[in-house]
Image (cartoon, coloured by chain):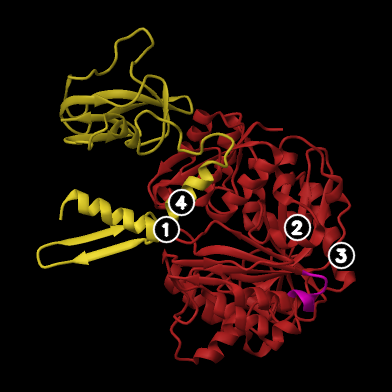
Amino acid sequence: MFSKVLVANRGEIALRIIRACRELGVASVSVYSEADIDSLHVQLSDEAVCIGPGPSKDSYLKPDRIIAAAEVTQADAIHPGYGFLSENPRFAEICESCKIKFIGPSAELIRAMGDKNTARATATKYGVPVTPGTEGLMASEGDALAAARKIGFPVMIKATAGGGGKGMRPALKEEEFLDQYRAASNEAQAVFGNGDCYLEKLVLNPHHIEFQVVADSQGNVAHLGERDCSMQRRNQKIIEECPSPLLTPKMRKAMGEASVELVKNIGYENAGTIEYLVDEAAENFYFMEMNTRIQVEHPITEEVMGCELIKEQIRVAAGEPLSSHVCNAQPRGHSIECRINAEDPYNNFAPSPGNISLWYAPGGKGVRVDTHVYAGYTVPPYYDSMIAKLIVTGARRDVAIARMRRALSEFMIRGIKTTIPFQQVIVDHPDFIEGRYDIGWVERYLKARDGEARTE
Amino acid sequence: MDLEEIRKIVELMEEQGLSLFHLEKEDFNLKLKKGTDVEAIREALGGLAIAPAAPVAVPGAPVAPAAEDGEAPVESGEVIESPMVGTLYRKPAPEADEFVKVGDRISEGQTLCIIEAMKVMNEIKAEVSGTISEICVEDASPVQYGDVLFRVT
């Protein structure tokens, strides 16, 4: 086991990792920017090193300063958390060459699964379904139409040089295909100087369902079930739940097995998450990408599967085999997480940094609050807006929903705006209660609420 | 209003558990504010850690020397702060002389010390000219970003 772990992160996840270290009897070092000097993770770690001014690019994204901090404090491992440098293969490489254990997979694996194209090819190679699409670019309109027929409508036409939504057109039916193809290609030609396109199957109203996997250095692999993260706004998750109200036992088994196969075949180590799109009818699943790190929403898996993922990451990195409670985990109950962000849900979710004058977090049975925030804390403007994770667990989904309703109503935060009122609306909504929501739900709801005049 | 009167007001605040006292008169304005939650929490949590939770104990940290002196810190001139994290060396080699001593005149661009990180020796150069009035770090000590290294007048 390591004697000292440096936490290369901030906010609630840094605190989470420090707490896991304390419980394991491992010393912890935190790094912090000048804007984070009052942050809780700095206070609770055994040592703390200032690595730069507020902006992330000058502090938390500086590999050399983080490694230097590990050197001066003689840390023997670094936990990168999520975001920042956690999926940066170069950072993992530097750790390796400096003989500091990077708590995660190897740099090689981070690199391989980080490239979306390579990851898709790898998934296909090991029998994981991916969104059907063309292998290469379309030589002509005729070729494109033939390929579209083969994939099956609806399809998404994507310019290979495209980006930011440009050069992309959906073709829901064959009749509109050629028009849309020409439009996509012409736009791409005009904006990027390259009109070449490829095709992908368009999954309508998809669900985002991800599987948690863990592997040790001895070839043991386990999956810990799924998380349904379809409740998103602009591709940012706001509510997650475990298990998914959508999956049949058959789908769960197939997806779980596919995930384990992939992880075994690539020789993955430590914790990871495989993200899938599931179609409306919950009949097909498609590999989207793999995140080679711990995820924000890992607590709902911990609550339902009765495991401790951060400690498992540290143990696996220290060379220990997977814990038996991880290998034999059985789901029990239902867990829901709300990401509480410092944003104004009535003003286009504008960020709301500032001083928190009052802070009362909910409690009671089945309520877990992961946060670095306290009364008197000032939310800095430099980082992402998540200030707390509210995780509730109940014996069944309806119990968990009632508990989340209760917990959200008790949460008192004054001084800044938060997304709590919006999450209260969602948790009360019949669509959510009936488990009938997909990736587009929030946007459709907001459009209806604010009308077409809402500025994006 | 003299110091005695202000002291009495502070005592009264303590007694009554007040956190803010504000008195505005024609010719003066007095505002007394008790410590915020931030400090109270910091103090309480500092006691929890396995080892003292203060930032890496570096002799250069601005607060310590001032408290030692027992008088209001008179910080004139420029400070040279650490631009990086690492181990600071005051000599180019163990047997060599120190780069600079107190009282030395320095010019812009002159090497003042070396900070080593990841096996790379980084020369720290002066951005101002002047005289070294104080050296706030010891040879071979760890430094973090922002630590005060030298004072120059």
Q: B136 or B86, which is in the foreground?
A: B136
Using the rendered image of the protein, determine whether residue A131 is visible from the camera's viewpoint.
no
Q: How far, Cα to Cα, is label 2 from label 4?
A: 33 Å
Comes first in the chain, label 2 or label 1 = 2
Q: Identify the disc placed on residue B40.
A: 4
What color does chain A have in the rendering?
red
- Measure the alpha-carbon separation of dots 3 and 4: 53 Å
Tell me whether marks 1 and 3 sit on the same chain: yes
Which of the labelled discs sits on residue A302, or is there none? 2
Tag nearer the camera, 1 or 3: 1
Could one spot residue B138 in this view of the protein? yes
Q: Are marks 2 and 1 on the same chain?
A: yes
Q: Are marks 4 and 1 in contact (CB under 8 Å)?
A: no
The answer for how far apart the CA atoms under marks 4 and 1 are is 25 Å
The tint of chain B in the picture is: yellow
Q: Given contact means CB atoms under 8 Å apart, are the residues at marks 3 and 4 in contact? A: no
What is the CA distance from the residue labelled 2 to the residue labelled 1?
Answer: 30 Å
Other-residue count near label 1 (Cα within 10 Å), few / some / many at <14 / 14–19 / ≥20: few
Nearer the viewer's eye, disc 2 or disc 4?
A: 4
**Rendered view: B95 above or below B151:** above
- Name the disc covering residue A382, or none: 1
Residue at (75%, 40%) from the top-left corner? A316
Q: Check disc 3: other Cα within 10 Å, few if <14, some if 14-19, many if 20+.
A: few
- Residue highlighted by disc 3: A254
